[in-house]
Structure formats: structure tokens, C-alpha cells
Amino acid sequence: MADVLITVRLPAPATLEAAMRRLGLAEDEVDAAYGLVPVDPARDLYVLRVTEDAGRRVGGGADGGPFSDPPIEPYGPPR
Amino acid sequence: MRVLIQMRPSPDLVAAVADPSVPSTTSDVADGLPGVVLDHSYAPVAVPRPMPAAPGGDPLSLNQPLVFSMAPQDASVVVRGEIADDEVASRMALLPAARRDVVAVYADPAIETTLTCAGDPAVGDWHDVERLLCVPDLAAEGLDGSGVPVAVVDTGVNAAYLKAARGQDVAVDQERSWSPQSVSGTPGDFPVDHGTMCAFDALIAAPKASILDVPVLLTRRRGGSTLDGLLSDAIAAYAHLREVLDAQPAESRALVVTNSWGSFSPRWDFPPGSPGNYSDNPAHPFNLIVGSLAEAGADILFAAGNCGRQCPDGRCAYPDRPIVGANSHPRVLSIGGVDTTGTRVGYSSQGPGRLAGRKPDLCAYTHFAGSGALGDDEPDSGTSAACPVAAGLVAAVRSRWPSTVLSTAQLRTLLRRTADDRSAVGYDYDYGYGVVDAAGVIAALRRRAAKAA
């Protein structure tokens, strides 16, 4: 289950494949449907969603993560 | 925070305060207390000293027979004032040490009628909100939301329902709307629910705005409730909104993003202090993309949440400081809720925020009979309703003031400065800088336009 986020810096045009190669991630460790999402174009910063094990393995290096991906809910009506 | 300050001035002064025939003022007793805005309308009050009734009693115990002495050498005097919310702890500790005549500083909690809570009937209706937001005056200035996209990041919008409820056409911009891959459906044609309420409330002040439907709370996850999503969906949505913003010509750049959602519990988050944490960590990717989108020219508003101390939502699980993550981001407006009488609703979350201390920023109207999207007799409620009400006012401003002319930071400052302040010290953790004041906004924009001419 893909349940954490990691960030990676890649020069444009970045692709999910390039990110996986850079981070040493296998296909079954990455949420390909989520893809590679730009966070801050000015800083060439992207985020991808990976399994918790993969996040632990590749996070904490030159790139960022693993970061939590908590559920979000509507703030209303109050119960 | 309102406080009572117990003082022990000279016996002559205590005697004067205790004598009802002698007029005395706060200035006679206390002046220049550092960090305290004294309330000069409050006449100082002499307070007797409790003393043991029997000789040899414990002078410090209240659990014994007592007599109360109003003798000038025994009694003290109480005055009233206010201390800035973010200085309360230090001022309360330092005042008795810095001033020998200060005995102690106590909280002076407001004695209020019961605040509006979940389950209470609506307080007023959306036409009252229209009146309070001076919508005809905004329209007369050309501030009606024309040409301004308002992204409703929520559970999806139903345009047909909105049109029927408002009695006028509603523009949903399908081309610039966005859904997570797991969500099927057409923008503007989702089931009537929370997102439709938010769109309705944004349109009160900005009836001609274009709604961008962004149903991130419709994604399904294992074990989740019927209406929730993941923060990663919101990151993807914001990446899309960045493209929307960047595609606009500079001379008309405007994008308002309203977010009536958040995280109720630390259970699914890494603990504060962990590098991967969301609630307290400005380096989390969602907090980064929020800052990046705001920097690029989007006005981003978040609901403060429904975890107010008086009647919190049952889902609230943070033990304190419930305005977390992006809801407390320094580059967003965090919106608390007041009813149409201008009184804070009891469930509106109080500050300080976790990323920025001074949260909420502002309050806007909620708990009124509005869209009916949550049920025929259900008010538009929660800070969920307050946030899009404020977003509508922002969108109204943007119809004539694009972010290249009035930056997002300048607009945030303008809204804070013109807000109807609900305390004597300019900022408090209940109301923030105050309740949004459309008349004040109009006047400030007129002054700005005159200066630029």
C-alpha cells in the first residue's frame, strides 16, 4: 500500500521514470497512478507516493521524506 | 485576554477606593503597567482580605472559619485590563515581579450567553450575510467576482442545485476544474453535499465568480469514511491550480482557493518534531506547495476548524492547538466563525496555530440558513461555511484588483487591518484580527485607488 510521500529534485522536464531511477525504486513500490507531482517549479521539487518500506529506505538522503499522507475531512457540519 | 489585576496600593488609596462617596478611577490606582491595556471605564473595586476567625489560624488557608477585613492596611484593589494573547504567560509571570504593588493577575473570562453550537438552529439567513457583507455596495464598485476563478477544494459541486437555490445562473468552469484519478464524475455535477454548500457561500459576496470544482474529498481510501481524501490528493490538486494560475495573463491574474477541510487527528501523522510530520512542519510537501501557490499569486483560505473549546466537534483529537498544518500556514488566511450577530460560534477553533502563531487571522459568518445542501433545516455551518464566505469577499475584491496590482500579502494585510476588531489589543486567539468588514475593505480600496491616480 502506497502510504507515504517523498520529495525529489529533478531538472525539467522531470518524469516518474527519472525519479524512480534516481531513487532506486521498483515499480511495485510506487503509486504510478498518482505520478510525479510538481511542488515548486522554481526549485525543481517534485513529490511521489510510495510504500512505507520504500519511503523508509530512500527517504532521509539528499531528497526529502518520508512524509506523512494523513486523511483529510470536511470541517462541517460540526458534530 | 481580559484580566483582573489585584493591586495593593497605599492604605490611603485603598481607603478612598473603598469609600463609595469618594470617586476613584483606574488611573488613581494603576498606570503604566507594562503590556497591559487598562480598562478606564471600569471603576476600581476594593476587595477584603480573608483572615482566620480564630487567633492562631493558618493565614494562608481558606478552609477554616474566616473573617473579611476591609481595613485599608488589609484590603486590596482590583482593576481590569487586557493583555495580548501571545504575551499572556510572560506578562502574568513578570507583572507581580516587576511591580511590588501588583499582587496577582487573574483571567477575567467573559460571562456570555450560550454560544452557538452544533445542533443549534440557524442564526439568521444568507440574506443577512449579504447585508453584513454590503453586497450591493460591493457590486456598485464593480466588485462582484466577475472573471475571478474560485477553486472549491472539497466534495464536489452541484451547479443545478446552486442555480435553483440562488435563483440565478452559476458558472462552473469545467475546463479548469480538476478531479483526482480515482474520482469519476463531471465537474459541477457531483451529489449535493458539503462542497455545494461551500460554493453557495462563496457566491454570496461574489455572485459572478467562476467556480472551479476540485473534489479531492471524494477519493476513497481503505477504512476511510464516506467523505474524505488524502493529503496527497490535495497536493496534486494544488499542482493543477498552479498551472491554472500560470496560464493567466499578468494583467488579470487572480485565483481564490477555498479549503473547508483539514486533519482532525494526529493519529495518521508522524509525531511533531519528526522530519516527516505534517501538522507542525513547514517543510511538508503540502505546506511547501501552499506557500508556492500563494507566492505565485493565489489567495488561499483555510477554515480554522471546529475544535473550539466551548463545543468542539467530536472528531477533534489534537490535545491542544487544533489549527494545524496548512490551516495555520503563514501565507493563507485562516478563517474562524461568527454567527450573524457577530458572536463567535462555540465550535470555532482558537489559536495559536501550529505553523504560525497568529491564527485564526479573521472571522466570517456561519451557522445561517443558506444553501440547504446539508438538509432542509440544516444551517450552513462550521468554519466550513465561514471560509467560503470570506473567500467570496476576496473574490469580489479580485474582480477589480488582480494579484499583480494588489499582491496576496497586501490583500491579507488589508483584510486584517480593516477587520472589525473584537478586543482592545488588536489581536486575540478567538476572533483573530476581527470579523471581515466589507465596508472597511471598500473604503480602503477607494483610498488606495485615489492614491494611485
Image (cartoon, rainbow, N blue to C red):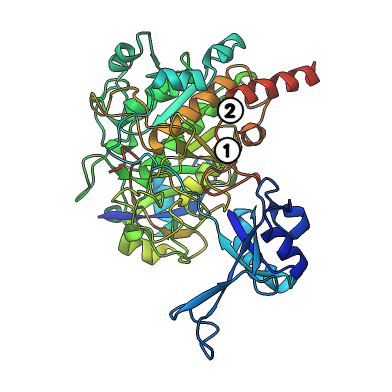
- Residue B253 visible in rendering: no
Towards the viewer: B450 or B170:
B450
Residue B259 seen anywhere in this rendered image of the structure? yes
Residue B135 in the image: state x and y as whole percent.
52, 16
Residue type, numbered disc 1 = Gly
**Label 2: how many residues lie within 10 Å, few (<14), some (14-19) or many (20+)?**
many
The amino acid type of the residue labelled 2 equals Asp
Q: Nearer the viewer, residue B264 or B48?
A: B48
Tag 1 subunit: B
**Residues marked 1 and 2 touching at CB (< 8 Å):** yes
Q: Secondary structure at mark 2?
A: loop
Looking at the image, which residue is at 62% across and 69% down? B70
Residue that appears at 27% across and 20% down: B189
Q: Percent position (x, y) of residue B37?
A: 70, 51
Dividing the picture into quarters, in which one does residue B151 lie? top left
Mark number, residue B434: 1
Is B253 left, or right, of B278 in this rendering? right
For the C terminus of chain B, the quadrant is: top right
Tell whether A24 sits left or right of B300.
Answer: left
* Residue at 32 percent of width and 58 percent of height: B268
Q: Which element is circle 1 on? A: loop
Q: Position of residue B325 (x, y in %)?
A: 46, 51
Q: Which mark is residue B437?
A: 2
**Relative to B258, does residue B55 appear above or below in the rendering?**
below
Number of the label disc, if any, that sits on residue B56: none
Q: What chain does badge 2 belong to?
A: B
